[in-house]
Amino acid sequence: MIEQMLKPEYIINDVEIPSKTKEDAIKKISEICSKKQPLNEKELRKSFLKREKIDSTGFGNHIAIPHAKIKKLKSPMISIIKFKEEINWNSIDEKPVKVAIALVMPYSDEQNMHLKIISKFARNLVNEDFLNKLIKEKDSKKLYKYIIEKLGE
């Protein structure tokens, strides 16, 4: 499941957000994702922000898992955005975010695929080795292989 949605080129390092705000980070995430797949950037940003209004996707331990559901989406995707500087995200533990794991799913996600993926990441994010690798690994291909190995089917 995850290997079809996450690709090494969807892992982006050193993303700059000068304002360090969640809103600008989400704008940048939407921009990045819409360049990787044929997505409407504004629609994507609106969907991410709509979800943030329900409750912060700041997972804790410097990780956020923003997610959006998009109508007529052909291929779901996961993108890992690693920020150059920490972002103020209103996380549950009040720590700033270093990495966003962005999920872009079809609007008609009957099987709640996004919840299954969040759950897979959440189970691994409590592991200090996994968390450190996610935050510190700069080689996108190595990180991709590591994530697939740990979260694969």
Image (cartoon, rainbow, N blue to C red):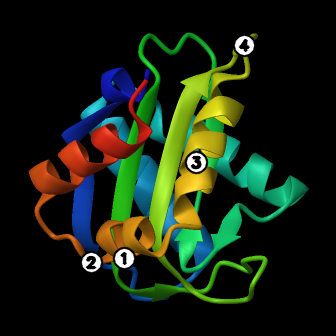
Residue at 13% across, 54% down = 142
Residue contact at pointers 2 and 4, CB within 8 angstroms: no
1 or 4: mark nearer the eye: 1
Corner quadrant of residue 7: top left
Q: Please tell me the numbered disc located at residue 136.
A: 2
Name the mark on residue 111.
4
The mark that comes first in sequence, 3 or 1, is 3
Q: Nearer the viewer, mark 2 or mark 1?
A: 1
User: Is 32 drawn above or below residue 22 in the view shown?
Assistant: above
The image shows residue 124, relative to residue 42, as above or below, that is: below
Give coordinates of residue 53: x percent, y percent: 84, 58
Task: Name the residue carrying label 3.
Answer: 45
Can residue 10 be seen in the rendering of this structure?
no
Q: Are marks 1 and 4 in contact (CB under 8 Å)?
A: no
Nearer the N terminus, badge 1 or badge 4? 4
Mark 2 neighbour class, 10 Å CA radius: few under 14, some 14 to 19, many 20 or more: some
Query: What kind of element bears circle 4?
Result: loop
Give the spatial CA distance, label 3 vs label 1: 28 Å
Q: Are marks 2 and 1 in contact (CB under 8 Å)?
A: yes
Q: Position of residue 117 (x, y in %)?
A: 58, 36
Dot 2 or dot 3, earlier in sequence: 3
Disc 1 residue type? Asn
- Disc 2/disc 3 C-alpha distance (Å): 27 Å
Give me the C-alpha separation between circle 2 and circle 1: 6 Å
N-terminal label among 2 and 4: 4
In this rendering, the answer to whether 102 lies above or below 99 is above
Residue placed most toward the observer, 149 or 105: 149
Asked which secondary structure carries label 1, the reply is helix
Q: Judge from the rendering whether residue 140 lies leftward or rightward of residue 62; answer left or right.
A: left
Find disc 1 in the rendering and name its residue: 132
